[in-house]
Amino acid sequence: MAEAHPVGFQWVMEAKARGATVIHVDPRFTRTSAVADLHVPFRAGADIAFLGGLINYVLTEGKDFREYVTAFTNAAELVGEDFADADVEGVFSGYNAETGRYDPISWQMDGAYEAPAAGQRDHWEPELREEHAAFTSDTAGGVGDQAYAPSDPERDDTLQHPRCVYQVLKRHYARYTPEAVSRVCGMGVEQFLAVARAITENSGRERTTAWVYSVGWTHHTVGAQYIRAASILQTLLGNMGRPGGGILALRGHASIQGSTDIPTLYDLLPGYIPMPNAHLHEDLQSFLDADAAKTGFWGHMDAYLVSLLKAWWGDAATPENDFAFDYLPRLTGNHGTYGIVRDQIDRKTFGYFLVGENPAVGHANGKMQRLGMANLDWLVVRDMQMIESASFWKDGPEIETGELRTEDIGTEVFFLPCANHTEKSGTFTNTQRLLQWRREAVHPPGDARSELHFYFHLGKKIREKLAGSTDDRDRPLLDLTWDYPTFGVHEEPDPQSVLAEINGFDADGNHLASYTQMKADGTTSGGCWIYTGVFKDGVNQADRRTPGAEQTWVAPEWGWAWPANRRTLYNRASADADGKPWSERKAYVWWDEESGSWTGHDIPDFEATKAPSYRPPEGATVEDALSGTDAFIMQANGKAWLYAPTGLADGPMPTHYEPVESPVANLLHDQQDNPAREDIDRAWNRLNPAMSETYPYVFLTYRLTEHHTAGGMSRFLGYLSELQPEFFCEVSPALARERNLEHLGYATLISARTAIEARVLVTERMKPLRIGDQRIHQIGLPYHWGSNGLSVGDPANDLLGVVMDPNVHIQESKVATCDIQPGRRPRGPALLEFVESYRRKAGVEPGGIT
Amino acid sequence: MTLFDAFSGAASSLSGPLPDPSADAGWSAEHPKRVGFFTDTSVCIGCKACEVACKEWNLVPDDGTDASDLYRLTGMSYDNTGDLGASTWRHVAFIEDVRPHGTATTGHMPSGLPALGGSLPRDAASAPPDGGTVDLLALLPDTGAHGQQTPDDERDVRWLMSSDVCKHCTHAGCLDVCPTGALFRTEFGTVVVQDDICNGCGYCVPSCPYGVIDVRESDGGAHKCTLCYDRLGEGLEPACAKACPTNSIQFGDLDELQAAADARLAELHGRGVEEARLYGRDPDDGVGGDGAFFLLLDEPEVYGLPPDPIVTTRDLPEMWRNAALTALGLGAAAVAAFFTGGRR
Amino acid sequence: MGVRTWLGEWPMFRQATGSDPLGRGAAVQSPRTRALEPRTREADEVVKSVCPYCAVGCGQNIYVRDGRVTQIEGDPDSPISRGRLCPKGSASTSLVTSPTRVTTVKYRRPYGTEWEDLDLDTALDMIADRVLDARRRGWQDTDDQGRVLRRTLGFSSLGGATLDNEENYLIKKLFMALGAIQVENQARI
């Protein structure tokens, strides 16, 4: 955190000064480790073993916060009899070895279907969908059946029943003993126990523990399960929805949170509404039946979605045409970025917009990225600097090796300069879901324009070209609401008008104040329901800037946080079942009996007047179905899920699998790696075999404080480039001895993809680890470099292959294997032969560019 | 004080304690209080914001425009700046300090280590920072920590970081030897080079006991930290201190900084961080104390700082006095008459 | 400038006649030094902004003079950052005033070996044509089982996560209307 989010880290330092204990668990010794009370080095990719070990410690030692667990979680619910745990084998029930996918039906609870609030909701495969539908009583009872009554699963509040979640969890993690964790992670038993004791002693009524993570947890074939594991631990310890608790994702880009909220992602619509899958006879209602829970706040997905459709298609969206639901294109599977690039190489897709993104060096398997671009008809790059993704046809590594020739690359490239953050107004959503409005300070120079300008005018132009079309497929374009007011000589669209559309309007054209005002009858509009309220009262709430010193410590008057300006999600859980704060010093939100409402330091994440004693009547739906203790209001049952019966593609409980490229066998389960992971089996994406002697070392990629991601905003600046001027690798003295690496000399790193060179930093901060009988060396690689800019070097990402998490299709780029040799890498075609010789030795199929 | 007094050694403005260097340099009684930096390295995270913020504000060239070895790694951990110089007015040093296991704590500010046992709940919001909530050492059994590691790996690393800067000495050698008056003592007690006066003679360079000031090749002038003299007049804090994420660089009135530093030192000693010490805080040291002083977690040499800096002009009065006596003895009184004749 | 004033500006005179006989302070302060003031004081306006690097969301004050950014500093009002910035945030002025920034359209024709210049409006028109062409070529009405797809796989988009919410919103909206499902973002990475 000190490394990549230094200014956010001031709060950790402040907490520390007040007595907080800071523990840093990271394969790498970073700036954070330097000031932590304890640094726990361990093997990259072993986090679930570590977190599972902590869960096991909590459960076997009875250290869970029992009152919290019984009040707010599904611990007492019984899992269905069909469920079979992963156990020694490491594979849960429902796995289909042929397809490599799970059918999650057997994971369901006993006597009820529980709908997921996120993740795998609908299934696009017809077989799974039918099975799923048969299991859900509402669809069986008829489409849109208002009489639908959710049934509660069987439960045992003593938590003793062998099939209750608490016991299932306990059995699942029983093998994750301190000794096993130590063996898998390469950390001392005592070191592990020190962490286990520290977090358990620092959780409960009086104290809370927070976990902070970044892409070190998501860049894995089991990334989503890493986060799940932390969720289970934090829920058991009663650290969710409470001040000083939580699992805090430190996101690496100014508005990466916003990019998922208003998703430029293939599988989501704004506000985490899933994109519709292709089905026979799919209409709006059957979509909602399949994707939306009937209880909890997702029960209002109809209102959120219809309001979105109204925002996009205005008067053309009517009750008669399902509010233009059919205008939305349909999915049939994974269309994530790596699949797109594969299709580019296969020439199945022809054009590509790269907007402030530099995949040629910033994404895993740079060769794959560049090959994709080289096989396009056209490419539009919008950036401030001449990044590698714009100039790959001229100076990419494949030109040097002779795999590609500039004269043979048919890609037409448009480089359009873009406006920077001072040259346009708009909102970023930061890592705590806070929208902050930036005001335009100066006009962009020359041809530079905002993305708002570019896409608005591109849309206008396309609509002009299609004017008068009678083709049915052009209706969505021609009916689109696309009439934002513009200003200035360049006709810049007014970003406030866009934000107001996102916020939404009622039938009279008033700005909506809350998503609870949204209706499914088409009388309201709103482009992203979770952002509704950001333009409450016609005021740009994201532009509020009451100085921090002039307001409470929660600072509710600075910017605007979704939803409803709540700063801590699920904060109902900061009070006990009766609505009283767990303790005086941890009071945050509580029930005020006198006024009959929730109150506190933050805006309660609960219906304001729903008493803790409220119990839903029979047959209640949406929020009415949640009791006064159901703090997790987005969940269909209002509970935090220690066990996830649906929503995940790779199991209801996190399980340790080795990274695909691992130097060791899985010591906890027979299954070596995630059986549901996604691969791309192509000549340009060869993988190092697990436990390969040819590629014996682990490497991990990461950031440095002085640079930013793929370097487009740092390598071109002198003041930053001089601070970290060259690409380097970090190795331990022991590895340096083993491979004759010289401090400040060059090293060549080799994988089945390619070979790159880096300067060598020999440092005691890198430690070899003992895993079983093996001594494991880890190599650190900051990934900021490329061929352009002031500070240049080989891209670390070129070393990576692409294997993905099945839930989110994110690549495993935080751990892989390689060899390292002293000296510089071969140049030109010799590099290809060098890499091929390694592949041959390792028994890997030949590489290639097609 | 007069020039004669200065030469005769009647006053001690070239060495020893000096409560008000601004007054000594002729600023009227209403001059502002002396300001400075207290750099608390125990909370430094080595982010180098100070280096960049300084260069951005002062428009100091990057190495790429002023050094022959463009953008090269130094190999000194994450320090690629190397040293203070004409184009580096803040320099963050990184020291990788290796010790046998068990003799050092991992963190360089081990708040959680001594003091309270783990089971005592404490009020973190109001409790004095006299120890951590969880005693990690107590949680570690006595025997065989890192039980799975090979002995080779049983070394602990401390990663010390420290942002160095011009010390704005009470007795500044650079200033005292400057023949042009380019270097001067400001009303804030800081030491600043005036670019329009400096002729690049370089006399100041060897006179700095810390090796701070240097001449820039590209413009031929001597340069160093000005403590953002242009900002001070406007009531703004220096750019580095303003940017510093963890408040490792504190700016303020020197007496208040000294009090804060003393309190911080006592706090760390109270926590058992025995190696903590202040550097440049002592007005009795060889430069009369520094306007920019530090809290270090090891010997100054570890950070590349001279252990006992002495102003290079300390012996100047005596040398001059001897020279003057010699001159008088030779009957060359006219020189002295010129100077004393200027008295009012 | 009268003789007296001129003489008063002469450091040696001031040194000899003032309270700074060694010429180490007030006596040698040059007129230029005396006139120093922070360049932020010259700003026509100070604009509230947010750092474009990581997702902490530190407040920035943008100092503008004559339509140009002259300085970017942390905004002390921000309860998130309290005026502080990391090295990248501190380099924001360099970022927005970078001399290597490309400010005109560059065009590389198919199989071309060099960049060419292109008018912005022409570029936009050409891109619109290519979008429509790729959309048509990649269009799918139904799949082989007759399920309605109503989409194109002809082109795709990959956005960085330094785009504004409003910008992402327009991208998603336009792509959905085009039937283009392949919209992706750094958030996937």
Image (cartoon, rainbow, N blue to C red):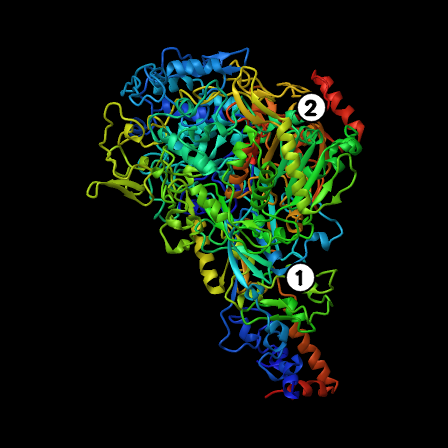
Residue A335 makes an appearance in the image: yes
Q: Residue furthest left?
A: A594
Q: Are marks 1 and 2 in contact (CB under 8 Å)?
A: no
- Residue A136 pos. (x, y %): 37, 17
Label 1: which secondary element: loop
- Image position of C2 with respect to C187: above or below: below
Q: Nearer the viewer, residue C130 or B20?
A: C130
- Residue B292 pos. (x, y %): 55, 60
The label number, if any, that marks residue A684 in the structure image? 2
Local crowd size for mark 1, using a 10 Å CA cut-off: few (<14), some (14–19), many (≥20): many
Residue B299 makes an appearance in the image: no
Label 2: which secondary element: helix
- Could you tell me which chain the residue with mark 1 belongs to? B
- Residue B69 pos. (x, y %): 75, 49
Q: Tell me how many marks there are.
A: 2
Q: Nearer the viewer, residue A813 or A742?
A: A813
Callout 2 amino acid = Trp
- Could you tell me which chain the residue with mark 2 belongs to? A
**Nearer to us: label 1 or label 2:** 2
- Image position of C165 with respect to A634: above or below: below
Callout 1 amino acid = Ile
Residue, disc 1: B213
- Image position of B172 with respect to A549: above or below: below
Tell me the quarter of the image containing the N terminus of chain B.
bottom right
